[in-house]
Image (cartoon, rainbow, N blue to C red):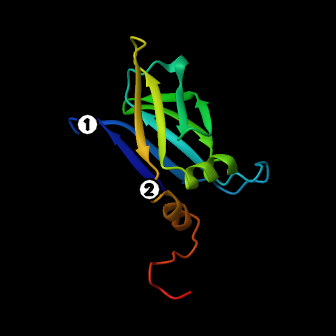
Amino acid sequence: MLTQPLLLKDGRRLLALQIASLPPSGDRSGDTHALVLSAPLGVHLPFGARLQVDDSVSLKIVFERCDEAGCYAGTPLTRNLDIAMQEGSDLNISIRDLNGREITGRLSLLGYSAGMRALRGESLQLPGAGS
């Protein structure tokens, strides 16, 4: 599982983005990973979360459940989103609080490709290493 937190200036966690492997299933169209966003309690659930890779791929995901630790939104990691994240530099995430104020944060995608190779069990190419 890959995890990247989005922290506020005071160091508190605003969001966390996780990418996890999905169990094998014959009814998926090639999606083998899911993207899960965890947010604190107090998010405006109907707004969901909006994700945008640089100025390209964007999508809205809905919050599916909340518990005492926060609220969770998820979506399959499609090939288009995966490629955009591999080629992109930033993932912009927007949520709203209960007062309707939009809160936007940016996660760096630096290291995303290497992390996904590791998650998929592919061998990593180290700089300076032979082929």
Q: Which residue is mark 2?
A: 110
Give, as a three-letter code, the residue at label 2.
Answer: Leu
Q: Where residue 25 sits in the image (x, y, percent)?
A: 73, 53
Q: Position of residue 121 (x, y in %)?
A: 57, 70
Looking at the rendered structure, the secondary structure element under dot 2 is loop
Drawn side of residue 4 relative to residue 52, left or right: left
Residue at point 37% right, 44% down? 5
Local packing at callout 1 (Cα closer than 10 Å; few below 14, some 14-19, many 20+) is few
Residue at left offset 49%, top offset 62%: 115
Q: Is residue 130 above or below residue 58?
A: below
Q: In the displayed image of the protein, which residue is found farthest to the front? A: 55
The C terminus sits in image quarter = bottom right
- Where residue 64 sits: x, y (%)? 56, 29
Left/right placement of residue 55 relative to residue 90 reads right
Q: Which mark is residue 27?
A: none
Q: How many marks?
A: 2
Residue type at mark 1?
Arg
Q: Residue at x 52, y 67 (%)?
A: 118
Residue plotted at (47% across, 55% down): 2
Check the image and name the residue furthest to the bottom.
Answer: 130
Query: Relative to the observer, which residue lies in front, 129 or 44?
Result: 129
- Asked if one can make out residue 101 in the rendered structure from this viewpoint, the answer is yes
Tag 2 or tag 1, which sits nearer the N-term?
1
Q: Circle 1 is placed at which residue position?
A: 12
Residue 97 placed where, x, y %?
40, 18
- SS under mark 1: loop
In front: mark 1 or mark 2?
A: 2
Alpha-carbon neighbours of circle 2 within 10 Å: few (<14), some, or many (≥20)? Answer: some
